[in-house]
Image (spheres, rainbow, N blue to C red):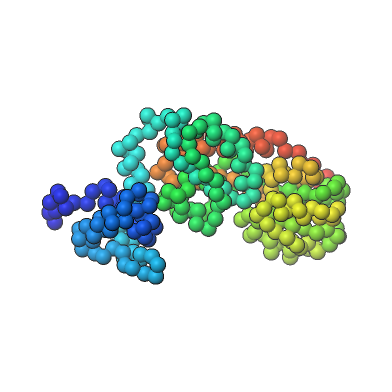
Amino acid sequence: MYVKYSDQINLNYLRVFNELYITRSTTGAAAKLGISQSAVSQILSKLREATGDPLFIKGQGHLVPTVRATTIGEGLAAELMLLEKKLYPDEFFNQADFDGEITFAISSPLIDIISKPLVEISSKILPKARISFVHWNDHTLDQIINGDVHIGFNLFPLNAPKEIRQIPIRESKPIFVSRTENKWIEEGMENSGFKDHVFAGVILSGINRIKGILENTDLMEGFRFKYRSESQSILANHLLTDNSVILVDELSSHHYEEYYCYQAPQRLNKLLPTSLSYAIYYLQANHQHPIYSDAERVVRNILDELLANIKIIPNQNRY
């Protein structure tokens, strides 16, 4: 069907539609685009006329996309970003002059360990950038797609949409931490000793999945998690008595430099996640952009340095 040039949908119309689809709000779309709510409403009216579809229907406190709007909106953010990259190529990008905003979403417990060196390096590489750090949450993958989060750090793999690139960086093994020297752990955690210790554990996906296995096995009879937390500070507060033990990942040992960190005994390998891979996550369409392509190298260097400077007491594996 012929549509005269003045009535055709242009790139700015698609940008407005994309923000409406993401925010489900004319106010939210206007704020993201830096235009008035009236301008958003006018463009929505033109889009409705062009498509012959209402596109968005008023719901309880938000707009509800129609089937036609969902068909248009799925994957549109990534397609717009690819088009932007063609229109505004990155070969002229200068990191020292970049004054935009970058938001990192970091999972617990990694945020307690990596945020300080990441801030230090980011301030050198991107001195004019505005950088935000947020905790990884249930909505982070969607936020990466809609642009509210630019780069994420979490365990690998996640059930992420195909628009998101997952790059495993480094592995980190599980360890046990105690307040004082603990020969029982060092010698191999003989079965009868579990009932004499009080355990806490870090909450992350690999360990969450095996909680039931740890607490229901003859190899660890009497084992129970009294506490579990995403916070390293809360876990450290658990280490108040000589019989207190926490189960964390190897990288987390940097938070417990005044404590005793022990390698897990081999006999428990089949019960514990023998390695936890950390990864970075960002929009696939951004892979060639210097900020994103450099992120893998920067994070890999940070993790390499952190893991090279940990002190883990080897297990004697007597049992």
List x then y, in percent, for residue 189.
82, 53
Vertical order, 95 against 316 (above or below): above
List x then y, in percent, for residue 52.
21, 63
Quadrant of the rendering where the N terminus is positioned: bottom left
In this rendering, position of residue 311 left or right of residue 125: right
- Give the residue drawn at x 30%, y 61%: 69
**Quarter holding residue 91:** top left
In this rendering, position of residue 51 left or right of residue 218: left
- Give the residue drawn at x 35%, y 43%: 82
In this rendering, position of residue 184 left or right of residue 208: right
Q: Nearer the viewer, residue 184 or 146?
A: 146
List x then y, in percent, for residue 170.
61, 41
Q: Nearer the viewer, residue 189 or 247?
A: 247
Answer whether residue 266 is visible to the viewer in this image.
no
- Give the residue drawn at x 40%, y 43%: 285
Q: Nearer the viewer, residue 54 or 219?
A: 54
Vertical order, 67 against 158 (above or below): below
List x then y, in percent, for residue 288.
42, 37
- Give the residue drawn at x 87%, y 48%: 183
Answer whether residue 215 is visible to the viewer in this image.
yes
Vertical order, 146 against 101 (above or below): below
Number of marks present in the image shown: 0
